[in-house]
Amino acid sequence: MDYEGYIKASNTPISLLKDILERKWTSIARLKKQVMDLERMCKQLKETNEQHQSDLQNFEKQVASGAITSQSGLDMFRNKGGDEENKNQSGDALPREPEKSKL
């Protein structure tokens, strides 16, 4: 069945059928952009993961060679990332109440 035969046999209003091809191509372009954005994000995450893996390997080598102690190195490694979540793991994240003294 050709396009003209489809239009005649279809119950869909002609106004909707006329721009269906344009809408499909618009959808394809939108989906292609989403795929490209997701591929870019995936590449960035892979690069970040590779960097963290190499940092971890370097840290483990330093601990094994005795260049740093495990606790001080662990603190250094946690604070290196720049994540606020990692920086506040020392237990002093909340402010303390001032000491009360008697006169």
Image (cartoon, rainbow, N blue to C red):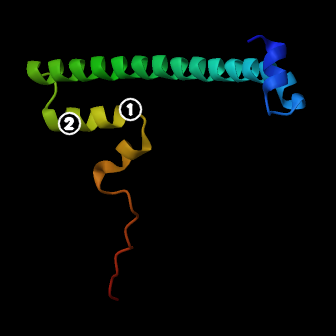
For mark 1, what is the residue?
81
**Mark 2 surroundings within 10 Å by alpha-carbon count, few (fewer than 14), some (14 through 19), many (20 or more):** few
Looking at the image, which residue is at 13% across and 31% down?
Answer: 69
Residue 72 bears which disc, if any?
A: 2
Looking at the image, which residue is at 64% across and 22% down?
Answer: 31
In the figure, is residue 89 to the left or right of 69? right
Q: Amino acid at mark 1?
A: Gly
Residue 95 bears which disc, if any?
A: none
In the rendered image of this protein, does residue 47 appear above or below residue 71? above
- Provide the secondary structure element on which disc 2 rests: helix
- Is residue 19 among what the camera can see? no
* Coordinates of residue 18 in the picture (x, y in percent): 87, 23
Looking at the image, which residue is at 78% across and 19% down?
Answer: 6
Looking at the image, which residue is at 83% across and 22% down?
Answer: 7
Asked whether 96 or 42 is in front, the reply is 42
- Provide the secondary structure element on which disc 1 rests: loop
* Coordinates of residue 73 in the picture (x, y in percent): 21, 32
In the rendered image of this protein, does residue 83 appear above or below residue 6? below
In the figure, is residue 44 to the left or right of 28? left
Mark earlier in primary sequence (1, 2): 2
Q: Amino acid at mark 2?
A: Ser
In the rendered image of this protein, does residue 4 appear above or below residue 19? above
Which is closer to the viewer, label 1 or label 2?
1
Specify the farthest residue to the bottom.
103
In the figure, is residue 76 to the left or right of 11? left
Asked whether 84 or 48 is in front, the reply is 48
Residue 14 lies in quadrant: top right
Image quadrant where one finds the C terminus = bottom left
